[in-house]
Amino acid sequence: MFAYTGGITRKLGCPLIAAGGTANHVHLLVVFGKTITLADLLMHTKKDTSKWMKSHGTRSFQWQEGYGAFSIGASARAATMAYIRNQKKHHTRMSFEEELVTLCRKYGVEFDPEHYLG
C-alpha cells in the first residue's frame, strides 16, 4: 500500500519520502506541494488508498474520519524517517493514543483526548 500511496501523493505534487505504521495508523512524510491544501491531500490519499485496499481483499477497510499533521524542518528529516521506519518497535512501548497526546502536548497543540479518542 505504501508504494501505491507514493504514486497518489506524487500525482498531487507531494512526493512521499517515508511511510510506515501499524494496524491502526499510518505515518507519511511528504514534501508538501504548493498547489494543494493539506485537507485535499489527505482526502484524495485516504479515498484512493481505501479503494485500493478494498480491491486487494480488505473489504471492510476504512480510514478514521480525521487526521493529524505536523510540519518539520530539513534538520529533522533523517530523525523523522527513522521514527517512521521504527513504528512497530516504538509502539511496543507507547500506544498510538498515548503518542498522539504526547505529540500534541509537546508542540502546544490544544487537544481534548476524550473528543478525539473517545
Image: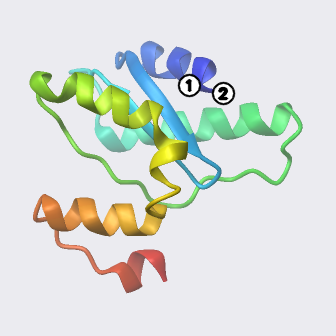
Residue depicted at 51% across the width and 34% down the height: 20
Q: Quick check: can you spot residue 32?
A: no
Q: Which residue is drawn at 35% across and 20% down?
A: 14
Counting from the top left corner in percent of width and height, residue 75 is at 10, 24
Is residue 61 rendered to the left or right of residue 37? Answer: right
Residue at the location (38% across, 18% down)?
17
Residue 98's disc is: none
Q: Where is residue 105 in the image (x, y as percent from the top left)?
A: 18, 68
100 over 47 or under it: above or below = below
Expressed as whole percent of the image width and height from the top left, the position of residue 22 reads 59, 47
Circle 2 is placed at which residue position?
Answer: 1
Q: Dividing the picture into quarters, in which one does residue 53 lie?
A: top right
Residue type at the position of mark 2: Met
Residue at image location 39% in from the left, 85% down from the top = 114
Q: Tell me how the rendering is colored.
A: rainbow
Q: In which quarter of the image is residue 116?
A: bottom left
Q: Which of 17 and 31 is in front in this view?
A: 17
Q: How crowded is mark 2: few (under 14 residues within 10 Å), some or many (20 or more)?
A: few
Q: Is residue 81 left or right of residue 66?
A: left
The mark found on residue 5 in the picture is 1
